[in-house]
Image: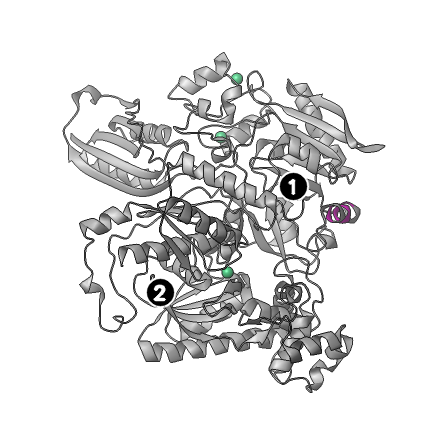
Amino acid sequence: MIAQSIHINGIVQGVGFRPFVARLARKVSICGWVRNDPDGVHILAQGSNSQLTQFYQHLQSDAPEPARIINIAKQQCEIDTNYLHTFEIVASEHDGSRDTLISPDIATCPDCLDELFDQDNRRYHYPFINCTNCGPRFTIIEDLPYDRLATSMHEFPMCASCSDEYNNENDRRYHAQPNACFTCGPQLWWCENNPDSPTQIHNIIKASNIVDSDAIIKRTACALSEGKIATIKGLGGWHLACNATNEQAVSTLRARKHRPAKPLALMVKDIKAAHELCILSPSEETALLSSVRPIVLCQRKKETPVTHSVANTLPELGIMLPSTPIQHLLFEYIDFPIVMTSGNRSGEPIVAKDKDALKYLASIADVFLGNNRAIVARYDDSVVRVLENESTQIIRRARGIAPSPLIDTSSTTSSTTLSQASTQTKTQTQARTQAQQQKAASVIFAAGSEQKSTFCFLRDKRAYISQHLGDLETLGAWNAWQDAFNTYSKLFDLHPEILTCDKHPEYVSSKWARAHSSKHDFPLIEVQHHHAHIASIMGENNLFEPVIGIALDGTGYGNDGTIWGGEILLTTRQKFTREWHLPLFPLLGGAAAIKDPRRIAYSLLRTFNQMENPQFKTFLESLPHYQILEQMYDKNLNAPLCSSMGRLFDGISALLQLCQNVSYDGEAACLLEAQAQKESINTAYNHSQTQLSALSFHEYIAQVITKKCIDISNKTGVYDIALGGGCMANRLLFKLLNTMLASEGFTIYTNKELPPNDGCISYGQAIVAQAQVLGE
Ligand code: ZN
Ligand code: ZN
Ligand code: FE
């Protein structure tokens, strides 16, 4: 017999990891123990050589899905004669240090689903069923260590049956903190708006047993069937729901929510129902069914029962599967897809508190399906997309993914700088000095961007990146940002010592960072927006050598005071040089041009001398305020210059008369991409290159960028490309660039676990700041 001690870290707590280890050990006849410690899971494994090999292999390959093993280390150790015949789960040796990773929320697992619909089970139809493999996690945690008293479950003392499960190490609910049942746990409540007096709520029902609970679910399902709008409390906030096949219901929701055109996410009963709406690849199916249960953007089928105004003419639908027992129960009584969108007022964060739901959502929803378990951390649904190469692109990183940190698993760093790039090689890598190691341990706080904002705490190799916190334009959003800051700071015991932010003079997060740094005398590092985009890719891919950074983006404050966004930067982690950018054109009316891209279109025609081009005659004739625009252009009035690729796409979209007014970020560009996709399928469009078309424009841009990259690599000898920025959400542009650049022999790196849009900015800022502090 041999003994091995195995140490595993990563997300291995609160995900049913110890019961899994114990089951596996017994299966392959390993003796010993498993234990949770603040630094991860420790195992003593005793057995024959072949048993140990088998055990070790299955530990990694069969781990429960929500678990994420970051590191696994084993070493030979002394045989413990107390464990020659058994394998046990033993008590933790707490030392109070906070190095645990908190699991994100996990969708209801198959075992719990079986029980939910098993009439003989004591949790039959219980809307809060969960176990160590599933259920709420981060959204209910108030403090660490993660146990029931430190969560919003503390209000629900366990009944005897639940306690027995909780204390039985062989039970699936052993130490499941949110464990609960009809007798002891959270319950549903329901009410509706009084149609005669819309601000008044009536018909309140509070469930205390299965009969009332079922009645509440049925009432909600019935309201949805009748075309009413329901607001339903989810894990991280309140959703708004309605029948997605009922045009009247969807347009009423849009009107009440002041959301005229932005596509709405859908929830369907199961994967079969998903197939009825979309053409799904195996990877898309996997993404839909994963324990994250994100919204997956998939190609819609030609004929679906979904009503037009859900996504208008766009080729994709955002769909997700139920992730909570409440949602599964609802689908027992409805047989149509439902719109499932964040419950918020325009621009505000998702509503989390019951009293806010009753106050703010009463003007939108007809009925309320609530429950008495408090939401501690607010979370939107995550959004992902599967790309042509089957990799997953994250568009919004939230429920089910955050707060898992990004962990740099590379062990080598190099000290190459831009000027040394051509002379130094990777073999000259130097180990960190002691002073550097000390600095590496300090906490860098990155304040992030203004839109699609996140923040990031970086300590050495671990980056704790907040969930998507939305656009910080409203006071409500800014307050939510600060709440999240306090939560992360407390839970992960992270206190900023070095601050970093965007160079933009007006970003509210930058202003906060500047004020906070002067108040506490912390160093502040301001990072250019597109440098941060590229640095985020370098961080995610462990790149330390210079890269050609392509940042195709909406808006970012440039070093020269103009608006950047179509940039090729020769980049290290520390700094960059701007090698190329889109030719500058004025945004007539500044922000007004973003809302009305026809202003950009006019500006493009003037800038690129196309006013006489007959193709654009009808556009110009239909243009309102022609003379005002002419004056603005001629006299340079309120006409800030930009090199933004996002704005160029907006302008071209307007020029091709695909879009006039924009009601949500990226609308014009989405319509341009949709048109180009259509053209690429219809071969008649091909080779009619004399005229500008959506497709020819996409191809032209990819060609120009590729050509510039060849020039830059000829000059610098750099063949690694980091490709990022918000325009990478354009599937076609992303594909064209990847194909063309790869065929020229470039190695292309992109964001992996972070979105290519501004959700990655905070992490990028932290990477730049860390490199500058360490001089790496
Ligand atoms: Zn479960
Ligand atoms: Zn109970
Ligand atoms: Fe950006």
150 vs 316, nearest the viewer:
150
Residue type of the residue flagged with mark 1: Gly
Q: Position of residue 3 (x, y in %)?
A: 18, 31
Q: Position of residue 416 (x, y in %)?
A: 26, 65
Q: Residue at x 58, y 19 (%)?
A: 182
Quadrant assignment for the N terminus: top left
Q: Which residue is mark 1?
A: 343
Which image quarter: residue 191? top right
Describe residue 176's horizontal placement relative to residue 84 as left or right: right
Pointer 2 local density, CA inside 10 Å: few below 14, some 14–19, many at least 20 = many
Of callouts 2 and 1, the N-terminal one: 1
Residue type of the residue flagged with mark 2: Lys
Q: Nearer the viewer, mark 2 or mark 1?
A: 2
Describe residue 314's horizontal placement relative to residue 60 as left or right: right
Q: Residue furthest left?
A: 78
* Main SS of residues in magenta: helix
Q: Which residue is mark 2?
A: 575
Q: Residue furthest top?
A: 160
For the record, the magenta segment spans 249-254
